[in-house]
Image (cartoon, rainbow, N blue to C red):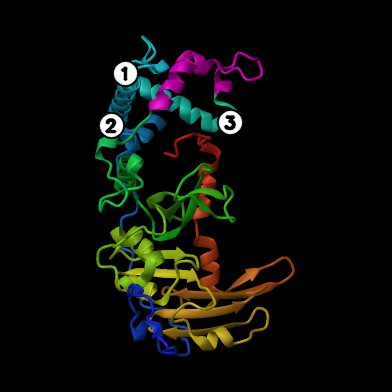
Amino acid sequence: MVARAVIPPSQPPRRQALRAPRVPEVLANPDWKPPTSAAPLIPPFTAQSGVRVETAQIGSALGFFELFFTAELYELVVAETNWYATQFITANPGSSYAQPFRWKPVQVSEFKTFLGLLLNMGLTKKHELRSYWSTNTIHHMPMFSAAMSRTRFETILHFLHFSGNSTSRPRGHPAFDRLHKIRPLIDHFNQKFADLYTPAQNICVDESLVHFTGCLGFKQYIPSKRARYGVKLYKLCERATGYTHKFRIYEGKDQTLEPVRCPDYLGSSGKIVWDLVSPLFGKGYHLYVDNFYTSVPLFRHLFLEQIGCCGTARPSPPGLPKWLLTTHLARRERAALCNQELLAVKWRDKRDVYMLSSIHADTTVQIERATSVIEKPLSVHDYNLLIGVDFNDQMLAPYLLSRRTRRWY
């Protein structure tokens, strides 16, 4: 009996795995040396911080509000809302909205009333939307029924629109945008935030969460945030006031971000920071970030752009000195190494804390406790004082007006 040769079935060639660009050796394994007490050569702060409009001519809270909600923005929202309502009624002639006198185009003045009622809902919280128009003595708020009927308010809310469907691109198209529905608002407010106010020297980048529990492809779960489920925002904020200078919305793992002059090997977290901070290059800002963003390559490149950085580090980021990671410290002891302008610090409090900074020297500050005085590394002390996106969320908390809706935007 002759054995037959077994011919393996043809298989498609394996795809080559896409590898992240390799970090240069000088950044992946820096030459760390003993620290000195001399401060690094920090670029001077040259920006003129503060409000960039004549506040004396504004005169009221409404005047400040309309610096951000401009006439052009009102006209855009009103036009898109009316267009969407017309399109919906034409496609659904049997709908109740198509009945005579049920729908009439929104005017700018009426939309301002609608927006005012919406903002007031953030100050006075009720369980149901209809409670604001209730005649029950417990819930009665005469301002709402005097300003606009409940039916008209719900109708405007139903057709509220910010960007036309005709300009959207299908999934898979090179210009596909998950945030197409609110892209005009994102661009408008990012521009206004930067134009109207210049932040002070100390800034920070961190995450914030807008509560949303419906079905959404890029919804995130962050257990450390109060909302836990929602749409994640990356914010660049001023620490002193909590003012948001710029923000980005997380769109999913397949989000592509290629900031100008940003090295590819910084990764997605580094590119987010670069994109947010790039308008402030060359002005000597001090940036504080948490361990999600901290890395030797990012801090080195930002320092070359005259942005000093300080942040907590994870126990095993690329480039952090291995000697520092393996050194055992007693409580309140510290160890440090430096490489050019970078300072790496390990400090033992209740647990090991790792810091990376390009704006601090290896110095300490005395902190008075109830029963003793302790010495804490200056980088740790400044970081605890100046990381501030949570402060931004705290300032917004009393005015949140989001509520459960069918449409995520």
- Up the image or down, 121 lies above or below 250; here it is above
Classed neighbour count for the residue bearing mark 3: other residues with Cα under 10 Å, few (<14), some (14–19), many (≥20): some
- Relative to 335, say whether 199 is above or below: above
Q: Is residue 359 above or below residue 148?
A: below
Spot occupied by residue 87 in the image (x, y as percentages of width and height): 30, 25
Q: Which numbered dot is residue 105?
A: 1
Real-space Cα distance between discs 2 and 1? 14 Å
Q: Position of residue 325 (x, y in %)?
A: 55, 84
The disc, 3 or 2, on the residue closer to the chain's N-terminal end is 2
Closer to the camera in the image, 250 or 330: 250
Q: Which residue is mark 3?
A: 125
Image quadrant in which the C terminus is located: top left
The answer to if 372 sits in the magenta stretch is no
Q: CA distance from mark 1 to mark 3?
A: 29 Å
User: Nearest the camera: 96 or 348?
Assistant: 96
Lateral position of residue 69 relative to residue 140, left or right: left
Query: How many other residues sit within 10 Å of disc 2, few (<14), some (14-19) or many (≥20)?
Result: some
Few, some or many residues within 10 Å of mark 1 (<14, 14–19, 20+)? some
Callout 2, which amino acid? Leu
For the N terminus, the image quarter is: bottom left
Residue range (magenta): 130-159
Q: Give, as a three-letter code, the residue at label 3.
A: Lys
Is any atom of residue 5 visible in this view?
A: yes
Q: List the residue tagged with mark 2.
A: 76
**Coordinates of residue 13 in the picture (x, y in percent):** 32, 75
Dot 3: what SS?
loop
Classify residue 40 by image quadrant.
bottom left
SS under mark 2:
helix
Q: Is residue 180 left or right of residue 220?
A: left
Q: Where is residue 245 shown, x and y percent of the image?
A: 37, 51
What secondary structure is the magenta-colored segment mainly? helix
Q: Residue at 62% of width from left, 69% of height from top? A: 367
